[in-house]
Image: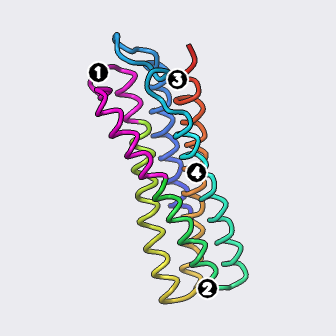
Amino acid sequence: MLGFWTYLMSDCLIFAALFAVHAVVGRNYAAGPSGADLFDLQLVAINTAMLLLSSITYGFAMLEMVKGRVKPTIVWLAITGVLGAIFVALEIYEFYHLIHVGAVPQRSAFLSSFFTLVGTHGLHVTFGIIWLVTLIFQVKRWGLTPSTRRRLMCLSLFWHFLDVVWIGVFTFVYLMGVLP
């Protein structure tokens, strides 16, 4: 577990650096569009709800794991994966829309930091989904062994960490991005 905590702290540093960059350049629009011009807060709120709900469903999976119930654990993990996939799909849609209207990373420092921060988070969620699917197969094959329980706990820490990071992204990038 110590190794995983070390990894998680290194991820904290990565996201701290990305947030710091966005804090410095997040209002440098280079005569291009601002967050107020680009962001669809309703879509972002739905996306946020998907990720936060996935955190709750992962919690239910962990409760079932503690009870030693394999099938309900797998069901809750699968629901978590679906919600995570919806989150990633909506993020891809948002990126597609932004690129389609010409709001590309090369346009301004704001857009460059936006795509980097949000994209890095999205890649982490994608990796988490792959890890989650792998664990579903492992739990299905081997049951809730000490090894699979430890892996589920590590993924739980990672998944909830991504939720905390997203709350920061939602607040500091999206909500503050639409303020004048």
Q: Nearer the viewer, mark 2 or mark 1?
A: 1
Q: Nearer the viewer, residue 147 or 54?
A: 54
Q: Amino acid at mark 3?
A: Gly
Return the residue at label 3: 177
Asked if residue 46 lies left or right of residue 120, the reply is: right
Q: Nearer the viewer, residue 159 or 100?
A: 100
Q: Amino acid at mark 4?
A: Phe
Local packing at callout 1 (Cα closer than 10 Å; few below 14, some 14-19, many 20+) is: some
Q: Residue at x 53, y 72 (%)?
A: 78
Q: Tell me how far mark 2 sits from mark 3, CA to CA.
A: 43 Å
Q: Residue at x 43, y 45 (%)?
A: 91
- The answer to which of marks 4 and 2 sits earlier in the sequence is 2
Give yes or no for contact between labels 2 and 3 (Cβ–Cβ under 8 Å): no
- The answer to which of marks 4 and 3 sits earlier in the sequence is 4
Return the residue at label 1: 107
Give yes or no for contact between labels 2 and 1 (Cβ–Cβ under 8 Å): no
Return the residue at label 4: 161
- The answer to which of marks 2 and 3 sits earlier in the sequence is 2
